[in-house]
Image (spheres, rainbow, N blue to C red):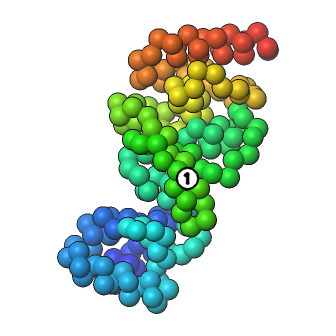
Amino acid sequence: MDNILKKLLKTHQTVFSFKELLIKSKSKEDNLKSQLNYYIKNGDLYHIRRGLYAKNKNYNKLELAVKILTPSYVGFETVLSQAGIIFQYYSSIFVASYQSREIKCDNHVYIFRKIKSEILTDFTGIQILNNSSIATPERAFLDILYLHKEFYFDNLEPINWKKVYEILPIYKNKRMSNIVKKYHQEFIESQ
């Protein structure tokens, strides 16, 4: 484990799952648990929650978000507010997942919203940034419309409508298509 820990500490990854460590270390489960406890006591690793560890307390919260429940990706209000599409500030991190849950972890709230499996596992409009799966603004926009018939967007200027229409078919939803056309038309008329 010493070599594995040294290798991990040199990577850009800040959060590690027990499963990842088990595969990389090739240790037996009980041996790995003992070693992890030793490193946590010595301050070489930070235990975030059951099965999740970090290099230290300054880990990437978005990286953790996609490791609490997998498969998942950061999206919804988190991405839309970062892109300037909605102006409301949210301290919680919103994540698309296979189940709906709210999890408080290390004094931070993660809100998981259930998305149908075929959509969740389709990586169209999902990018990997800093070891996290994150929706593009266009995918986050569509995911919000998938879950909500009506949603108020403060600023549709950052939306790339060509990308929206490229991603839209993964939802296989006529209602959504009509709503997207309505928002697009309203945007065109406001210009």
Q: Residue at x 45, y 16 (%)?
A: 173
Residue at x 46% of width, y 79% of height:
45
Residue 50: name its quadrant. Answer: bottom left
Q: Residue at x 51, y 13 (%)?
A: 175
Quadrant containing the N terminus in the rendered view: bottom left
Query: Which of the two residues, 16 or 191, is positioned nearer the viewer here?
Result: 16
Is there any visible trace of residue 73 in the rendered image? no
- x, y percentage for residue 24? 28, 69
Residue drawn at (24%, 82%) of the image: 31
Residue 190 x/y as whole percent: 79, 14
Quadrant in which the C terminus is drawn:
top right
> Badge 1 is on which residue?
110
Amino acid type shown at disc 1: Tyr
Position above or below: 123 against 104? above
Provide residue 53's location: percent of width, then percent of height.
44, 71
Is 19 on the left or on the right of 66, as rendered? left
